[in-house]
Image: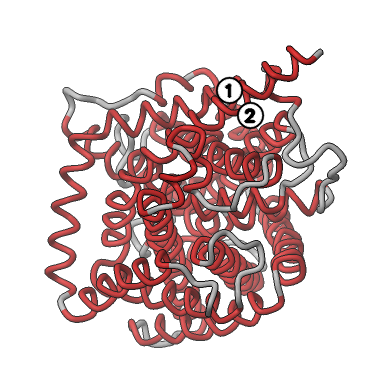
Amino acid sequence: MKKVSAVFWVSLFICGIVVVFGGISPDKLQTITASITGFFSDIFGWYYLLIVVLMLLFCTYLIFSRLGKIKLGKKDDEPAFSLPTWFAMLFSAGMGMGLVFWTTAEPASHAFSAPPAAEAGSGQAIKDALKYSFFHWGVHAWAVYGVVALSLAYFKFHNGYKGLISATLIPLFGKKSMSGWPGKIIDILAVVATVVGVASTLGFGSAQIKEGLVFLFNLPNTFGLQLIVLVVSTLLFIVSAWTGISRGIKYLSNINMGLGFLLMLMLFIIGPTVLILNMFTSTLGAYLTDFFNMSFRLAPLDEENRTWINNWTIFYWAWWISWSPFVGIFIARISKGRTIKEFMLGVLIVPSIVCFIFFAVFGVSALDLEQKGIALISEFPMETATFGMLAQYPLGFLMSILTIFVVAIFFITSADSATFVLGMLSTGGTLNPPSAVKIIWGVVLSAMAASVVYFGGTAGLQNVLIIAALPFSVVILLMGASFFKAARSEISTNVKRK
């Protein structure tokens, strides 16, 4: 543990306070976080929307600018992973488990429970349901990841800096400042945001695994069962983390992408195939047509619509921001050797399209059942909606078992990736953090997930996410500015030499 820095101990202390407070006084913590979240959403909603659009515009600019020719590595470096494996690892770390959780629940909720604007159950509400699902899981999310990952990969592999968030800000604030406590504070912020973001997702995943087991095997629906799921999953991802990134995460990502696509293909064939194709095509057109309207929609004069935006869009933007240090570092780690143009195209486009396909297949299958009078969102908790939907189709039990496996493996790959990233941030940016450090962070992640679920369930998860995301969003903006300053200076220098 000699390599452990002050960042590790301070971050561990902060996370420990949340875990202990959540266990001792869950109601009080829930009240406090709800008050802070309400304030953040009301006062800074405009800020979340603007900065995410700004990040997307920045990523798009890089694809077409001369900066796109810069390689994320040295001149002779080649990508360590094939394109299919790279895409699988991107998707598994960046979206996987959350996607399986929300593909059924979100469209059904938008259409029949809490629509964005139209009357619940109307044709317009159903159309809006899938359109906003595309919006929340599309290029906006990946732009947030892209800015963080690009900055880290550029400074680590191209310039040889340490693999730390603070190191990416050296062009703005100087090496001395970023090597001292100002840099450590930024890295602590990144660690805490990562723990909160990943722990929240592990809470969603463990809840869905638990609900699946309850639904399929009539087990008692208790917090104790979810705790058992968390403990078992923790042991499994610690074993995976011990094997290293190139073995554990690589193989699990490929296996799970295969299982995920098998599940999706089964439902596509068994479910309302033609309706899925029609809705996918129509929704893609609506998504592109209303892209900017959705991006800037805040409804300042409509309290009901504004509440919906706070609960969904602002929550999602906060989720992606809180996940960005974890996903960004992981994406940077696996993207060495690719040009900025190739990197941005891969990060923005391919995962977004995969998300759209998953939402079309699972979401439309659920919406079709609701239209036929088979209630899902009103009869089942959000965690059970997918299993309730699959049960209405042939081979439903088999697909539900497969869903549990997919969620469990996504759980392991996400937690595995997170322990690597947290270990990296805690040990001065080393690409091979000690196994003991990764195991400690694995236990902390699971403890945080258990605590957050215990004190607030889904609402508690949303509260903590929004709180953790706000301060780190400023760091992301600084990372983008720092990269742009350094990369533009490099290009200008090379032009003068020629």
Position of residue 457 in the picture relative to residue 424 (left or right): left
Q: Is residue 485 above or below residue 325?
A: above
Which image quarter: residue 292? top left
Q: Is residue 71 above or below residue 107?
A: above
* 1 versus 324 height, above or below: below
Question: Which residue corresponds to mark 1?
Answer: 285
- Tag count in the figure? 2
Q: How is the image coloured?
A: secondary structure
Residue indicated by mark 2: 281
Residue closer to the observer: 183 or 419: 183
Where residue 128 sits in the image (x, y, percent)?
43, 32
From this viewpoint, is residue 111 visible?
A: no
Specify few, some or many for label 2: CA neighbours under 10 Å numbering under 14, 14-19, or 20 or more. Answer: few
Can you give x and y, in whole percent of width and height, for residue 497 in the image? Answer: 78, 15
Q: Judge whether residue 219 can be spotted in this image.
A: yes
**Front residue of this view, candidates 115 and 270:** 115
Label 1 sits on a secondary structure element that is helix
- Which residue is located at x 12 percent, y 69 percent? 28
| Whole-percent x, y for residue 63 in the image | 67, 23
> How would you rate the neighbour count of disc 1 (Cα within 10 Å): few for under 14, some for 14-19, many for 20 or more?
few
Q: CA–CA distance between discs 1 and 2?
A: 6 Å
Q: Secondary structure at mark 2?
A: helix
Q: Amino acid at mark 1?
A: Gly
User: Residue 444, relative to residue 92: is it above or below?
Assistant: below
On the image, the x and y values in percent for residue 111 come to: 39, 41
In-front residue for pair 359/491: 491
In the rendered structure, are the residues bearing label 1 and label 2 in contact, judged by CB atoms less than 8 Å apart?
Answer: yes
Residue at 49% of width from left, 59% of height from top? 101
Residue at the image point whose x is 66% and y is 79% from the top: 242
Numbered label attached to residue 330: none
Instruction: Give the amino acid at mark 2.
Output: Thr
